[in-house]
Every structure is written in structure tokens, then in C-alpha cells.
Image (cartoon, rainbow, N blue to C red):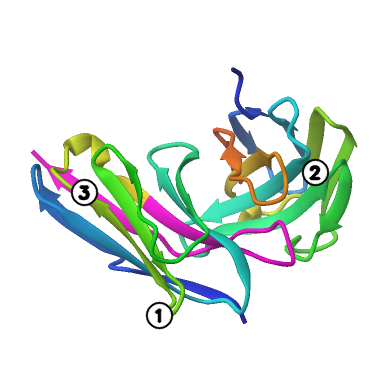
């Protein structure tokens, strides 16, 4: 069965810290791996990764995919309180449009 | 640009009642997805449509749940009769299809008493 596992499940840091969120998966074939940020309402799209070893970057956030070791990481540098959210890792299998979500990592950034 | 629009934002009703959730996808998007989110189970896909046609409804919990997409700009998710265990946040998402990211609406928070 296809599975996405995120770690840690929760994390508390202070402003300015750097965090690394992990996502490992057991999916036979997939089109893409996506990261979403969910605050109080809808998940908002962060990154889509399709190729191994190519880093995607947006401001203080970056992400990379390792298809050989079957994992992805999401890095946030110089964290701010506004980064507090649940971060969701999800995979889109090759043969379907559906997304398989991990449990999420709840990040709390304290002032 | 308008995002995915869902209504109502909140719904509180008694068990046994019919509940209808509505979704307007982003204009031009040809794939639409209904999800349910709970603390216990996280985000679960219920059903998705491509070009208004249901493709995969394997996530629909049981016959009490049904979804329709009569045209490219509107979809409904109906629960009849509703039960307390249906209480959750229901999200609708849309995408351009293929290998494109999904964009989520703000969700409907459903409480069945």
C-alpha cells in the first residue's frame, strides 16, 4: 500500500532557528511530490518536486527530493512566528490524479 | 484571481438531516477533488473528477455520500442521512490536471449533532 510518513510529527523552535522537516515514502511510481502549508484554513501550495537532486527554493524555504533513498526534506531558515503551521507532504502516483498525504508536521515558532 | 470557493463555511445540523456542500473550482481547471480532514485520519481523498466525470470514488465512505459535477464550474458533495461521525472539515480542490498542483478552498466545517 502506498504510504507517506512525515517526521517529526511536531516541532517547537524559536525565531531565527533553522528547521528541517522530513518526508519518506513508499510509493511504487509517482509523478510528483508536493509540499503544502496549512495554517487555520486551506492547505496552500509550496513546492512541487519531480526530479531527484534539484533544489526548489522560495525565500527562506527550500526543498529537495531524493528518489533513490525515497525521501524529501523541507528546510526553513531564519524561522519567523508566521511560519507556524502544519506542513503536509503529499505524493501524486503516476497512474492517478489523487494525492496521498502524510500525517503532517506541526511547527510552532516561538518569539 | 478567485480561488476555489466553497459554501457554506460552517454547517451545524442534527443527525439524520441531509447536508449539501458546494464548490466552485478555479476557472479553467479541469480536475476537481473532494477531501475530508479530521484530527484522527488527517486529509483523505473522497472523490475526484476529470472534465466533470468521476474518476475515482474509492474514498467515499459509504452510500450515504454522493458527489456530482453537473458542469465545469460547480460540484456538490451530499451526505444523506448525516451522522455525528461525519463531522469534519471538507475541502474542495482543483487543478489544471495532469502533473499540476492542486489549489484548495477554505473548507466547510461540518458538525453533526
Q: Find residue B72 and report its image quarter.
A: top right
Q: Is residue A42 magenta?
A: no
SS label for mark 3: strand
The residue to which callout 3 is attached is A108
Quickly name the residue at label 1.
A69
Q: Which residue is mark 2?
A: B78
- Please give the name of the residue rendered at 44% of the width and 66% of the height, measured from the top-left corner: A52
Q: Is residue B18 visible?
A: no
Q: Residues within 10 Å of mark 3 (few under 14, many from 20)?
A: many
Residue at the (14%, 52%) spot, across then down = A18
Residue under disc 1 on the same chain as residue under disc 3: yes
**Which of pointers 1 and 3 indicates the residue nearer the eye?**
1
Question: Is B22 placed above or below B41 here?
Answer: above
Mark 2, Cα crowd under 10 Å, few <14 / some 14-19 / many 20+, is some
Image coords of residue B93 (percent x, y): 64, 41
In depth, the one of A84 and A45 nearer the eye is A45
Using the numbered discs, state the Cα–Cα distance from disc 1 to disc 3 in whole angstroms: 28 Å
Q: Label 2: chain? A: B
Vertical placement of residue B62 versus A75, above or below: below
Q: Nearer the viewer, mark 2 or mark 1?
A: 1
Which residue lies at the image location 17% right of the left edge and 38% below the top edge?
A80
Amino acid at each position: 500500500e502506498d504510504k507517506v510518513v512525515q517526521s517529526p510529527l511536531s516541532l517547537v523552535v524559536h525565531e531565527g532557528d533553522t528547521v528541517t522537516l522530513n518526508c519518506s515514502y513508499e510509493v511504487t511510481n509517482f509523478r510528483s511530490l508536493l509540499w503544502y502549508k496549512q495554517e487555520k484554513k486551506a492547505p496552500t501550495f509550496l513546492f512541487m518536486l519531480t526530479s531527484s537532486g534539484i533544489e526548489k527554493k522560495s525565500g527562506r524555504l527550500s526543498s529537495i527530493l531524493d528518489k533513490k533513498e525515497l525521501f524529501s526534506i523541507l528546510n526553513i531558515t531564519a524561522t519567523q512566528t508566521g511560519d507556524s503551521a502544519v506542513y503536509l507532504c503529499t505524493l501524486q502516483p503516476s497512474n492517478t490524479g489523487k494525492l496521498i498525504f502524510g500525517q503532517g508536521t506541526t511547527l510552532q515558532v516561538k518569539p | 484571481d478567485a480561488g476555489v470557493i466553497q459554501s457554506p463555511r460552517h454547517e451545524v445540523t442534527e443527525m439524520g438531516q441531509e447536508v449539501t456542500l458546494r464548490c466552485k473550482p478555479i476557472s479553467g481547471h479541469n480536475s476537481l477533488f473532494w477531501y475530508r480532514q479530521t484530527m484522527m485520519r488527517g486529509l483523505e481523498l473522497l472523490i475526484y473528477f476529470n472534465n466533470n466525470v468521476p474518476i475515482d470514488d474509492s474514498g467515499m465512505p459509504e452510500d450515504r455520500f454522493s458527489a456530482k459535477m453537473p458542469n465545469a464550474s460547480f460540484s456538490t458533495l451530499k451526505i444523506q442521512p448525516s451522522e455525528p461521525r461525519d463531522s469534519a472539515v471538507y475541502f474542495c480542490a482543483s487543478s489544471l490536471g495532469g502533473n499540476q498542483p492542486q489549489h484548495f478552498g477554505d473548507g466547510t466545517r461540518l458538525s453533526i449533532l
